[in-house]
Image: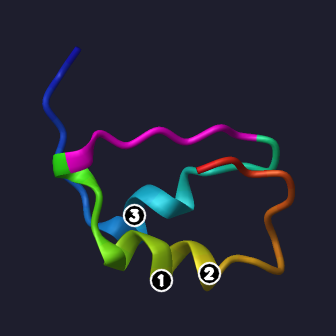
Amino acid sequence: MSNQWMTAAEAVKKIKSGDRVFMQGSAYTSGFDTCCAGRKQELNDVEL
């Protein structure tokens, strides 16, 4: 497994409908929520 850094916006682009997304407490940011909300019209049944 390689260490890859990416922004919240880049990470959210990888989410597909039906995915279950887990983030460890220290990795979670409010920016991630904002980016997910920006895709609410395209994503269905995503668990955070």
Instruction: Check the image and name the residue furthest to the top.
Output: 1
Left or right of residue 24: residue 2: left
Q: If the image is split into quadrants, where does the N terminus sit?
A: top left
**Mark in the foreground, 3 or 1:** 1
Say few, some or many: other residues with alpha carbon within 10 Å of mark 1 (under 14 / 14 to 19 / 20 or more).
few
Vertical relation: 38 (above or below) 36: below
Distance from label 1 to label 2 (Cα)?
Answer: 5 Å
Mark 1, secondary structure of its residue: helix
- Disc 2 designates what residue? 37
Pointer 3 or 1: first along the chain: 3
Q: Quadrant of residue 43?
A: bottom right
Mark 2, secondary structure of its residue: helix
Left or right of residue 44: residue 25: left
- Disc 3 designates what residue? 10
Where's residue 19, x and y in %?
70, 40
User: What amino acid type should be assigned to the residue bearing mark 1?
Assistant: Thr
Mark 3, secondary structure of its residue: helix
Name the residue located 16 percent from the left edge and 49 percent from the top edge: 26
- Report the magenta residues as a range: 19-25
In this rendered view, identify the residue nearer to me: 28 or 14: 28
Q: Which mark is residue 43?
A: none
Q: Quadrant of residue 31?
A: bottom left
Where's residue 7, x and y in %?
26, 66
Name the residue located 58 percent from the left edge and 50 percent from the top edge: 48
Left or right of residue 9: residue 29: left
Name the residue located 37 percent from the left edge and 43 percent from the top edge: 23
Q: Which mark is residue 34?
A: 1
Where's residue 2, x and y in %?
17, 22
